[in-house]
């Protein structure tokens, strides 16, 4: 089994990857240096080929890199646990339990922690099955299969948590395109290990 999985709209084998269209990504703004509180400016540091936020006083280069979002598809008896978001962005829409990875944890531990925080649920994390580059957001989203092992309830960032039959997944009310892709592949896999599905989203668009 190859580690990547071909699918429509995905970046496929490494030798087919096009050069990134970096100019489409808007860098987050920064005013002050976190090391010395002086103002920062945008410039290409010596020996680099990309412009960065650089402190005009102490010279520190503030590199900005993608953030990693980890989540899972908790399943029990053929039903999938989803959370209705209580916070922006996309408050009131449904999502898989997922969130930003913390320092000091593995991606699997992060996915389990997010599920506990958002759905008050314990899960047994399975295998990594979907990787979605959300280039417009500067994020990489990773999704695991998971077994739901406990009761569940709405966590503090969640309005509601509920189990859905596959036929009842609220596709029109999903919060994020990353979630949609992961859920589509999860349903298509139907419990089979088809490797890791890889997908790239470059532009912001509705889920
Ligand atoms: Zn500084």
Image (cartoon, rainbow, N blue to C red):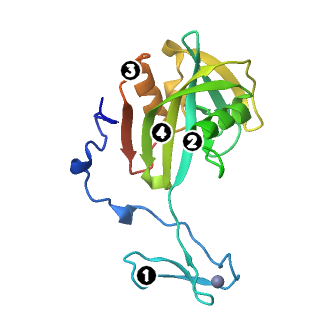
Q: Earlier in the sequence, mark 3 or mark 4?
A: 4
The residue beneath circle 1 is: 44
Q: Nearer the viewer, mark 4 or mark 2?
A: 2
Query: Which quadrant of the figure shows ligand 1?
Result: bottom right
Q: Which residue is mark 3?
A: 188
Q: Which residue is mark 4?
A: 178
Which residue is at 63% across, 38% downward?
A: 109
User: Residue 201: image x %, image y %?
Assistant: 39, 46
- The residue at 57%/86% (across/down) is 59
Looking at the image, is mark 1 or mark 2 earlier in the sequence? 1
| Residue at figure coordinates x 30%, y 44% from the top left | 11
- Residue 107, image x and y in percent? 57, 41
Give the residue number, with chain letter if any, for mark 2. 107
Among the two numbered marks 4 and 1 on one chain, the one whose residue lies closer to the N terminus: 1
Q: Nearer the viewer, mark 2 or mark 3?
A: 2
- Left or right side of 135 for 125: right
The residues tagged by marks 4 and 1 sit, at their Cα atoms, a distance apart of 32 Å
Chain-order first, disc 2 or disc 3: 2
* Crowd class of label 3 (few under 14; some 14 to 19; many from 20; radius 10 Å): few
Q: CA distance from mark 2 to mark 3?
A: 23 Å
The answer to whether 178 is drawn above or below residue 56 in the figure is: above
Judge the density around disc 1: few (<14), some (14-19), many (≥20) Cα neighbours within 10 Å. some
Q: Earlier in the sequence, mark 4 or mark 2?
A: 2
Mark-to-mark CA distance, 4 and 2: 17 Å
Q: Residue furthest left?
A: 15
Q: Residue 25: where, in percent of width, then height?
A: 43, 62
Q: Earlier in the sequence, mark 3 or mark 1?
A: 1
If the image is split into quadrants, where does the N terminus sit?
top left
Residue at mark 3: C-beta within 8 A of ligand 1? no
Assess whether mark 2 and mark 4 are in contact (beta carbons under 8 angstroms): no
State if disc 3 and disc 2 touch (CB < 8 Å).
no
How far apart are the alpha carbons under marks 3 and 4?
16 Å
């Amino acid at each position: 089994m190859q580690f990547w999985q071909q699918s429509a709209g995905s970046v496929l084998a490494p030798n087919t990857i096009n050069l990134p269209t970096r100019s489409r990504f808007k860098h987050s703004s920064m005013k002050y240096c976190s090391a010395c509180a002086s103002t920062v400016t945008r410039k290409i540091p010596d020996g680099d080929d990309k412009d960065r936020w650089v402190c005009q006083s102490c010279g520190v280069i503030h590199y900005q890199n993608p953030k990693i979002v980890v989540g899972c598809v908790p399943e029990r008896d053929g039903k999938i646990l989803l959370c209705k978001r209580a916070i922006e962005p996309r408050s009131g829409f449904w999502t898989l339990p997922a969130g930003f990875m913390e320092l000091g944890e593995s991606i699997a531990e992060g996915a389990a922690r997010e599920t506990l925080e958002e759905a008050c649920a314990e899960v047994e994390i399975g295998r990594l099955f979907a990787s979605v580059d959300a280039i417009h957001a500067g994020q990489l989203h990773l999704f695991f299969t998971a077994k739901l092992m406990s009761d569940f309830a709405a966590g503090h960032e969640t309005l509601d948590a509920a189990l859905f039959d596959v036929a009842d997944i609220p596709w029109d009310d999903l919060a994020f395109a990353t979630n949609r892709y992961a859920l589509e592949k999860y349903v298509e896999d139907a419990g089979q290990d088809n490797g890791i599905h890889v997908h790239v989203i470059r532009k912001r668009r509705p889920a």
